[in-house]
Amino acid sequence: MNFRSKNLLVTGGAGFIGSNFIKYFLDKYNDTKVVNIDCLTYAGNLDNTKDFSNNPNYFFIKGDICDEKHMSQVFREYKIDGVINFAAETHVDNSINNPNPFIKSNIIGVFNLINIAFKFWMTKPFKYKDEYKNSRFHQISTDEVYGSIKSGTFSEKSCYKPNSPYAASKASADLMVRSFNKTYGLNTTISICSNNYGPNQNQEKLIPKVIKNFKENIPIPIYGNGLNVRDWIHVIDHCEAIDIIFNNSDEGHIYNIGAKNELSNLELINRINSILNNFYSKTVKIDFVEDRFGHDFRYSIDTSKLEKLFKWKSKKNFDSEIRKIIKMYCDD
């Protein structure tokens, strides 16, 4: 099966979603080189790449997307003709405590990447170099850009109303990507996804933290009353949707990606607890803590555009996949 790019740059490919995407991609395609650039902060781990590190089509570079000189060199040396940008600071609590790294990576870094892509692929606005006429820049975004919604769902036409520094930085990046499509004719797409779960997830995130604290008999801290709602999608379903969008979408489009699997934090913990009881004869301990500043109550996105255009739907069953993840952690 052919992919539209021959030399694909994946940023943040040692992180949770990026590493899963590269594995998915290399298992599916054998005619495209994948260049993974990651600065290996706490969220990036080369252990996440060990399953494909010896693949002849895979190349790893330690680097920062904010480094214009280095990134330009990568584009030239590897003849990059496609970019999927996973690189981002993503932990909301960290963005509240110190927004500076989020502005740097999620806004300045994205501007740097997309500006280099424009200069490398195009001779002037709306005029591609012949060898880069199929090039595309894809931005990975989050449902947090829409803000919170009490009932109903957000569509791709909904206004951005981010409520945390993290969400605001991602919204800013999306708008920058959009501007390069509208002003310069750069071929761009954006996907907005709900909460991911699956292998390689950082232990600061809720599902790994619940399992880890349970195993170690540590109470699980839950903000407020635990009734905040999120939609959970398996990371491989997310990866498949990105692949479809990058390869098939018309330029300039935005797509919501979700699984219609909305759970409150308490419901999520109870689901995990019922499965963990198969391994341990104890129950989850919950410690309700002071609510997060600006805590969004509910995220919910309408995925009908992606489903109708490309016949895509999430396939992974939440309960069965959570069992696999729990077993993986319990076998460690």
Image (tube, rainbow, N blue to C red):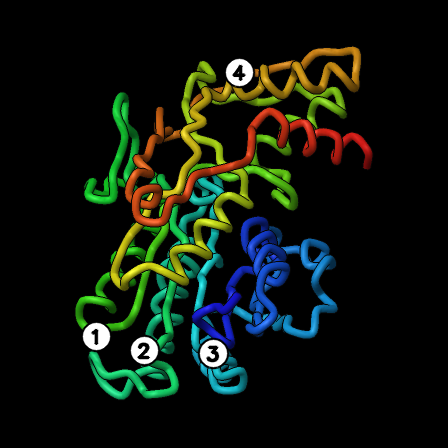
| Residue at x 43%, y 39% (from the top left corner) | 313
Q: Quadrant of the C terminus?
A: top right
Front: mark 4 or 1: 1
| Residue at x 75%, y 24% (from the top left corner) | 215
Which quadrant of the structure image shows residue 162?
A: top left
Q: Amino acid at mark 2?
A: Phe
Number of on-image labels: 4
| Residue at x 82%, y 33% (from the top left corner) | 331
Residue 67 seen = yes
- Mark 4 vs 1, N-terminal side: 1
- Mark 3 vs 4, N-terminal side: 3
Kindly identify which numbered label has been placed on residue 80: 3
Kindly identify which numbered label has been placed on residue 194: none
Looking at the rendered structure, the secondary structure element under dot 4 is strand
Looking at the rendered structure, the secondary structure element under dot 1 is helix
Which residue position holds label 1? 184
